[in-house]
Image (spheres, rainbow, N blue to C red):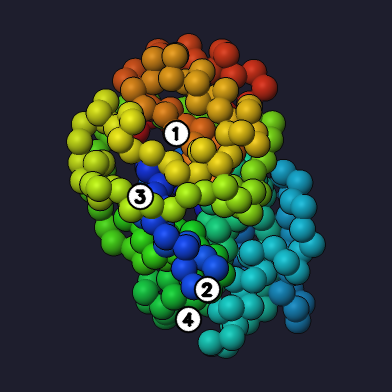
């Protein structure tokens, strides 16, 4: 079975409070976007499960890859035969696009189907939540309002039809710990879902990513990228997740393509929504 784990972007990200367990309660909307890795899962030729990674360099040993973590998490609750898994990495890492989380979630779904395990999406989402905060989103893989630590999700309607999205990752990556290092949690007066219900051209200054004040001083290239989008005709632009990628929403393909000419040192994806 061949699967295409896709990335996500965050439309707004409010950091509400620090929890007693050291994590933070957040509120964000995640939407899937067409920037994909390639994942193949087949029954193992031998007795053990293997993972072969190609494409972008992944700075972790195979046994710590989230794909293998997903296999072990699934094996802990049901009998899963050994598999040979092949992952070609295309989505940039350290970009706030959820590539590793997508790989893990798609591994759960793929194993479930390849070996006819019969697990429901809700069960797979519960398993995914133990792997990483973004992982359950990719089980649903549709626009979701995410609360709590990000694992409590409910469907939300977001209409971006007709817009063109540009996602760019500068030549820096942002560790999640660095993004959280200077955050100042607070509860907004107006809930995020209400703000997102406004037309896209009214989001600026209202729909915000609360990681930006923490990340921008540490990684000026990320702030410069957002500024470039803002002056280049985007109706809305923001950092995705904890960074370092920045996305911009344009009203036309022409404006989007003109902008890409100024992004020579970035990895870029242009998506017609």
At 47% from the left edge and 63% from the top edge, which residue is drawn? 18
User: Where the N terminus falls, by quadrant?
Assistant: bottom right
Q: Position of residue 165 (x, y in %)?
A: 41, 29
User: Mark 4 highlights which residue?
Assistant: 117
In three-dimensional space, the C-alpha distance between marks 4 and 2, rounded to whole angstroms, equals 34 Å
Q: Where is residue 118 in the image (x, y as percent from the top left)?
A: 42, 80
In three-dimensional space, the C-alpha distance between marks 1 and 2, rounded to whole angstroms, equals 29 Å
- The disc, 1 or 2, on the residue closer to the chain's N-terminal end is 2
At 37% from the left edge and 74% from the top edge, which residue is drawn? 122
The secondary element bearing badge 3 is classed as strand
Quarter residue 51 falls in:
bottom right
The secondary element bearing badge 2 is classed as loop
The label shown at residue 29 is 3
* Discs 1, 3 touching: Cβ within 8 Å: no
- The disc, 4 or 1, on the residue closer to the chain's N-terminal end is 4
The label shown at residue 238 is 1
Q: How crowded is mark 2: few (under 14 residues within 10 Å), some or many (20 or more)?
A: few
User: Mark 2 highlights which residue?
Assistant: 21
Q: How crowded is mark 4: few (under 14 residues within 10 Å), some or many (20 or more)?
A: few
Q: Which of marks 1 and 2 is in front?
A: 2
Judge from the rendering whether residue 227 lies leftward or rightward of residue 16; answer left or right.
right
In three-dimensional space, the C-alpha distance between marks 4 and 1, rounded to whole angstroms, equals 40 Å
- The disc, 3 or 2, on the residue closer to the chain's N-terminal end is 2
Q: Nearer the viewer, mark 3 or mark 2?
A: 2
Q: How crowded is mark 3: few (under 14 residues within 10 Å), some or many (20 or more)?
A: many
At 64% from the left edge and 78% from the top edge, which residue is drawn? 72
Q: How crowded is mark 1: few (under 14 residues within 10 Å), some or many (20 or more)?
A: many
| Figure check: 132 above or below 273 | below
Quarter residue 104 falls in:
bottom right
Tell which of 261 and 207 is nearer to you. Answer: 207
């Amino acid at each position: 079975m061949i699967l295409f784990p896709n990335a996500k972007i965050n439309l707004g990200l409010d950091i509400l409070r620090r929890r007693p367990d050291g994590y933070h309660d957040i509120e964000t909307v995640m939407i899937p976007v067409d920037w994909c890795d390639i994942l193949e899962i087949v029954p193992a030729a031998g007795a053990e499960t293997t993972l072969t990674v190609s494409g972008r360099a992944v700075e972790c040993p195979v046994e710590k890859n989230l794909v293998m973590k997903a296999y072990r998490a699934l094996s802990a609750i049901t009998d899963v035969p050994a598999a040979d898994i092949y992952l070609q990495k295309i989505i940039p890492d350290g970009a706030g696009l959820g590539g590793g989380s997508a790989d893990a979630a798609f591994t759960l779904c793929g194993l479930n189907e390849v070996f006819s395990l019969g697990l429901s999406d809700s069960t797979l989402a519960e398993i995914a939540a133990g792997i990483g905060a973004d992982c359950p989103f990719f089980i649903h893989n549709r626009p979701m309002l995410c609360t709590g630590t990000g694992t409590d999700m409910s469907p939300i309607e977001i209409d971006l039809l007709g817009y063109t999205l540009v996602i760019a990752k500068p030549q820096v990556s942002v560790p999640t710990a660095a993004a959280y290092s200077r955050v100042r949690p607070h509860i907004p007066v107006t809930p995020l879902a209400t703000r997102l219900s406004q037309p896209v051209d009214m989001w600026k200054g209202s729909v915000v990513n609360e990681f930006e004040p923490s990340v921008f001083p540490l990684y000026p290239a990320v702030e410069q990228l957002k500024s470039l989008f803002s002056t280049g005709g985007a109706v809305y632009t923001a950092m995705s997740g904890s960074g370092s990628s920045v996305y911009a929403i344009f009203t036309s393909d022409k404006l989007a393509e003109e902008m890409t000419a100024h992004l020579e040192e970035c990895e870029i994806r242009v998506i017609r929504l």
